[in-house]
Image (cartoon, rainbow, N blue to C red):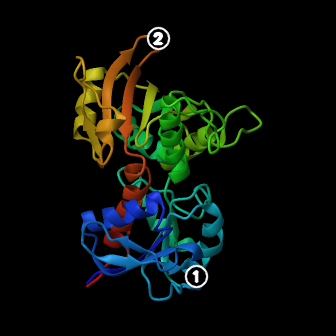
Amino acid sequence: MGYRVVVVGATGNVGREMLNILAEREFPIDEIAAVASPRSQGTEIDFGETGKKLKVKNIEHFDFTGWDIALFAAGSEPTKIYAPKAASQGCVVIDNSSLYRMDPDVPLIVPEVNPDAIDGYAKKNIIANPNCSTAQLVVTLKPLHDAATIKRVVVATYQSVSGAGKEGMDELFEQSRGIFVGDQADAKKFTKQIAFNVIPHIDVFLDDGFTKEEWKMVVETKKILDPKIKLTATCVRVPVFVGHSEAVNIEFEKEISAEEAQNILREAPGIMLVDKREDGGYVTPVEAAGDSATYVSRVREDSTVENGLALWCVSDNLRKGAALNAVQIAELLGRRHLKKG
């Protein structure tokens, strides 16, 4: 027996990726529904490569009664309306927006990092998916934290435009094409030109000068991994279509060498270590796009602090940063709580 699964926001980048990954991983499904805003009603979309077409249903009229799991990729505003409705009708919500991440009654889950936290899902029948930049970071930090206890992390991100949705990807494409023919690169989705440029600004600015994206990385890492970890982040949008990269500097309580860290990461779940100290012996977003792993490269000791390491990690933000992690949560939920048959 399988589950009755709803994908909310099914026509967006993440929603489509959720459908692809559900099919790819052969998630046990008896029935699946694609749900989106009224303007998408009746649109046909693919259920991965199964050959099956799904006709999109209108979220405003959808009844969640009798459905087991709803994967939400609809953004905070629709989620605020429809996630509590789904949860109250007995459907467990796995939400990709930022709305519930810091709610103390909602578990924030990365299955490789804090699977036991899922046991608290029944308080609201809602589980939160972390920010895309946080997800790959905590997957990388977890095995190292277990080995040597992390005190402090300094991270600079290089985040692709797909993190800003289809509008962000379209803007990079249009600006790049326009520049080659001498047209002006007008900024609409982003605050400045993104083509052939980098923008040190993601989400809104807070009173302390950090952005909300940077704040998310701090508070989500503490909630998922360890509240004692000190973390500071600088989040940067770069002209890459898919795949977030991060330069990470870590200070530990205990001594750990680069070789020890490499051996630990090589065996860690969800991680692929590609770390050859030669030309091309590392992973970039182009190689990570379409893959499920979080790739780690350039592990080295930092002599400027006691017990310090520096490393580089890359992941497909539409997969591990969003859709894949949500499906992995659904798999974990099924194993621990919603057993069928």
Looking at the rendered structure, the kind of residue marked 2 is Thr
Horizontal and vertical percent position of residue 116: 41, 59
Residue 52 as seen in the image, left or right of residue 81: left
- Chain-order first, disc 1 or disc 2: 1
Foreground of the two, 36 or 204? 36
Looking at the rendered structure, the kind of residue marked 1 is Ser
| Residue at image location 58% in from the left, 40% down from the top | 218
Q: Quick check: 254 above or below 339?
A: above
| Residue at image location 37% in from the left, 45% down from the top | 316
Foreground of the two, 289 or 131? 289
Q: Quick check: 105 above or below 158?
A: below
Q: Quick check: 302 above or below 180?
A: above
Disc 2 crowd, CA 10 A, few/some/many (<14, 14-19, 20+):
few
> Residue 88 shows which numbered tag?
1
Q: Confirm whether residue 115 shows in the render.
A: no
| Residue at image location 40% in from the left, 63% down from the top | 16
Residue farthest along the front direction in this orientation: 181
Horizontal and vertical percent position of residue 53: 33, 76
| Residue at image location 51% in from the left, 47% down from the top | 170
From the image, which quarter does the N terminus lie in? Answer: bottom left
Q: CA distance from mark 1 to mark 2?
A: 53 Å
> Residue 304 shows which numbered tag?
2
Horizontal and vertical percent position of residue 133: 48, 42
> Residue 116 shows which numbered tag?
none
Residue 245 as seen in the image, left or right of residue 268: right
Residue 28 as seen in the image, left or right of residue 135: left
Horizontal and vertical percent position of residue 182: 54, 29
Q: Secondary structure at mark 2?
A: loop
